Image (cartoon, rainbow, N blue to C red):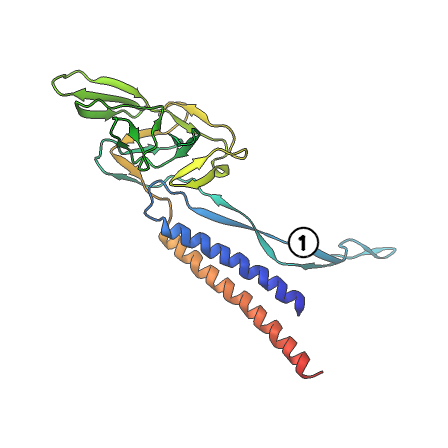
Amino acid sequence: MMPALWVSKTGLEAQDLALTTVSNNLANVSTTGFKKDRPVFEDLLYQIQRQPGANTSADSRLPSGLQLGTGVRTAGTQKVFTTGSLELTDQPLDMAINGRGFFQILNPDGTIGYTRDGTFHINNEGIVVNVNGYPLEPQITVPDQTNQLTISKDGIVQATLFGDPNPQQLGQIEVVDFINPAGLQARGGNIFLETAASGAPQAGVPNEDGFGTIEQGALENSNVEVVEELVKMITVQRSYEMNSKVVSAADQMLQFLTQNT
């Protein structure tokens, strides 16, 4: 009975973490550019009491042996980088990447962050920044007398000034991608950081070399599917109940022993 208690205890911990992951996904169902998480579990060490294939006689072997599992643990959480749906906003500085790629953001500590959130604004110096005031990299400055701002699908930013019908080119938006986006570190604030698992960033121009296009006046919605997460939540709840039933059953067996010995 005691081993069963500890095995079910690991199951309760695993399902608790799974529910935390589901709740975080649902909490961010309206977060622009959010990528859902998926927990990954693995079984723990096995107690091999009879080795599979061991000889039982000179001419026979054990077909399966006796292996007792010790539970489950969470091996990790994986970001799922499927593309979310695009929502039109008609705001000139809202941008969505339709396909592969990340925007580059200059963090206050001088490092580069990566995001799929294309909600950009202009600060008091005319620099294009994200919602937290961190500038887009490479930096783009919009003139004071801008009448119309145009961003092409390949990331060329042009501004038409009052009284001047000829547009001026302000800069080129670059996007980057990683060989393993799931290896990026989620820092919060819709920002990812490079890690050894993600690989080095591979920079490029939108709409070239397999990178996605820039869609001006649109934003990428979260890729969380509400119905899918609700089904996962029900599954987690039932799994938690089953593990708690094992704890209850083991407790009742121990109670029977203590009361009848």
In depth, the one of 105 and 123 nearer the eye is 123
| SS at circle 1 | loop
- The residue at the point 24 percent across, 24 percent down is 142
* Image location of residue 97, percent across then percent down: 34, 32
In depth, the one of 152 and 196 nearer the eye is 196
Q: Amino acid at mark 1?
A: Leu
* Image location of residue 233, percent across then percent down: 43, 58
Residue at the extreme right of the image, as rendered: 58
The correct choice, above or below, for 13 with respect to 83 in the image is: below
Looking at the rendered structure, the number of numbered marks drawn on it comes to 1
The correct choice, above or below, for 165 with respect to 68 in the image is: above
User: 10 Å neighbourhood of mark 1: few (<14), some, or many (≥20)?
Assistant: few
* Image location of residue 148, percent across then percent down: 18, 25
* Image location of residue 184, percent across then percent down: 48, 37
Q: Which quadrant is home to the C terminus?
A: bottom right
Residue at the extreme bottom of the image, as rendered: 260
Is 61 left or right of 82, judged from the image as shown?
Answer: right
Among the 4 quarters of the image, the one containing residue 131: top left
- The residue at the point 37 percent across, 23 percent down is 205
Is 159 left or right of 209, judged from the image as shown?
Answer: left
Q: Which quadrant is home to the N terminus?
A: bottom right
Among the 4 quarters of the image, the one containing residue 245: bottom right
Among the 4 quarters of the image, the one containing residue 135: top left
**Where is mark 1, residue-wise?**
45
